[in-house]
Image (tube, grey):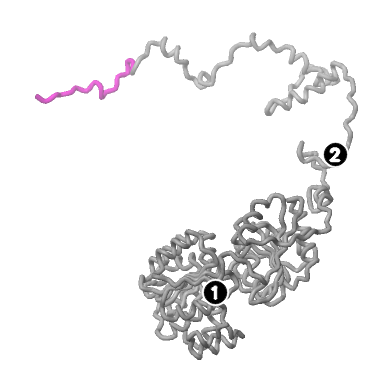
Amino acid sequence: MTEFSQLGLSPTLLQAVAETGYTTATPIQAQAIPVALVGRDVLGIAQTGTGKTAAFTLPLIERLSTGRARARMPRAIVLAPTRELADQVAESFAKYAKGAKLSWVLLIGGVSMGDQVAALNKGVDVLIATPGRLLDLFERGKMLLTGVEIMVVDEADRMLDMGFIPDIERIFKLTPPRRQTLFFSATMPPEITRLTTQFLKDPTRIEVSRPAQTADTITQYLVRIPTSDPKAKRTALRALIERADVKNGIVFCNRKSEVDIVAKSLQKHGIDAAAIHGDLDQSHRMKTLADFRAGNLKILVASDVAARGLDIPDVSHVFNYDVSHHADDYVHRIGRTGRAGKLGQAFMIVTPADDKSLDKVLKLIKKDPEELVLDIDFAAIKDAPRRDDKRGGRDRDRSGGRGRSRAAEAVEPAAPVALTEAETTAAEAPARSRSRRKARPVAAVDAPLETPPMVAAEPVEAARPPRAEREPQPRQSERRGERRPEERERSGVKGFGDDVPAFLRRRVVIPA
């Protein structure tokens, strides 16, 4: 075990680290901090929850302790893929930089840009930003990147998943080539390898664990259900939460819309839960995370926005409501529990439609999670009528077809009744009138009042001559006053006829 005092940090920085309660460095911190302090590029590969944030924050503060910030010219940039992760890096920077006279600003979307511009005008040492907001302010002319001395990229593989690699490349090209780069990622896909080869200069590669390896402090369980019905999945999730001794847990869903549905379902059944995903307002997301960290919220239902890098202490359980589409995301999801040597449990609900995704996860982690069997009659849940269907109790037979109520379907049809010829004609007449668009009823003026209209309509229908004997109707072009092509040919008019334009009669003089 390596003590922080052996890494070459200043006494002021060691005091700030001691106040946070840490005395022993993690493997990634013990290997990355000394290399970063001498100014070399670092390529750090470590699984989530191993302390990568402190591995670049501490040497960053140490190297920037000497020097002075200039207006609109930051000295260092820390790029994070999500607003929550950027805010977490800012909190770590605030804790460790207590004794250093360094200024910093958090550049993320969803908050006022005016305050960020005002801080840039005063001059800041460190920009902690998401790529989109940083480029937005740069394009507005609010900053210059020519004075950047240190460039940090955190959770680079998450940047790749979110489509930020073109933005990262552009930011690299805007900074001076003689900068120091600290590059950290949990996995190394080919695109990330290409990026490091292009922008890092002879980096020191530090890999403290096999990529995509799950922590040994996490007990993993697999729950198979025989149906993909959402109602059955929500029932299984509630059963797992009630069965396990959950202090606080995170439920991960693949889609943002599913996050809201699951959170409302848990709330409806008396479970303290709240949703967080990228479509929510930034202030609401921050408040939800703060409540969860403080212990005021038991269950956090989240998309993968909370799967990477968030340091939420003492998360006891992680529930995978959906099997992640990418196997790497599973590792990051369950990495929210079992952190800093503490024990955690992770559950994964699997339906018959998740077989391919499950095979990718099992192949990656090289483990077989223990299978749990829930005492639930899923067939009864699937066949049960939905009480929350607002249309269920209404008689929807008026809509004319698909929406008939079950009560209407249960009524047996009446037995057929023999009709006379007159009654049959009268019954068919409304159908004929409905088949004609905007058909108007024929008024039988001369007919006596006691004569039914349907009976009077029969002679009118019979009086119509057959289709072959009817007079041909004029074409649409003839109704507009136009003549047929053959009539125009018989008229003998060709070209302009007798009306020769004046420009054709003009005398032409050809020069000699």
Q: Which of the two residues, 500 or 370, is positioned nearer the viewer here?
A: 370
Left or right of 56 on screen, residue 439:
right
Mark 1 vs mark 2, foreground winner is 1
Q: Which of the two residues, 107 or 14, is positioned nearer the viewer here?
A: 14
Q: Quadrant of residue 27?
A: bottom right
The answer to whether residue 274 is seen in the rendering is no
Residue 485 % position (x, y): 45, 15
Among the two numbered marks 1 and 2 on one chain, the one whose residue lies closer to the N terminus: 1
Depicted 12 relative to depicted 43: above or below: below
Say what secondary structure mark 1 lies in: helix
Give the amino acid type for the residue marked by disc 1 in the picture.
Lys
Spatial CA span between label 1 and label 2: 64 Å
Q: Point out the image quarter for the C terminus.
A: top left
Residue 440 % position (x, y): 71, 26
Task: Give me the disc on residue 52.
Answer: 1
Residue in view at x 65 percent, y 58 percent: 362
Magenta-tinted stretch: 496-512
Q: Quadrant of residue 441?
A: top right
Left or right of 382 on screen, residue 505:
left
The answer to whether residue 42 is seen in the rendering is yes
SS majority, magenta: loop
Give the amino acid type for the residue marked by disc 2 in the picture.
Ala
Left or right of 486 on screen, residue 372:
right
Depicted 210 relative to depicted 493: above or below: below
The residue identified by callout 2 is 408
Magenta segment includes 509:
yes
Say what secondary structure mark 2 lies in: helix
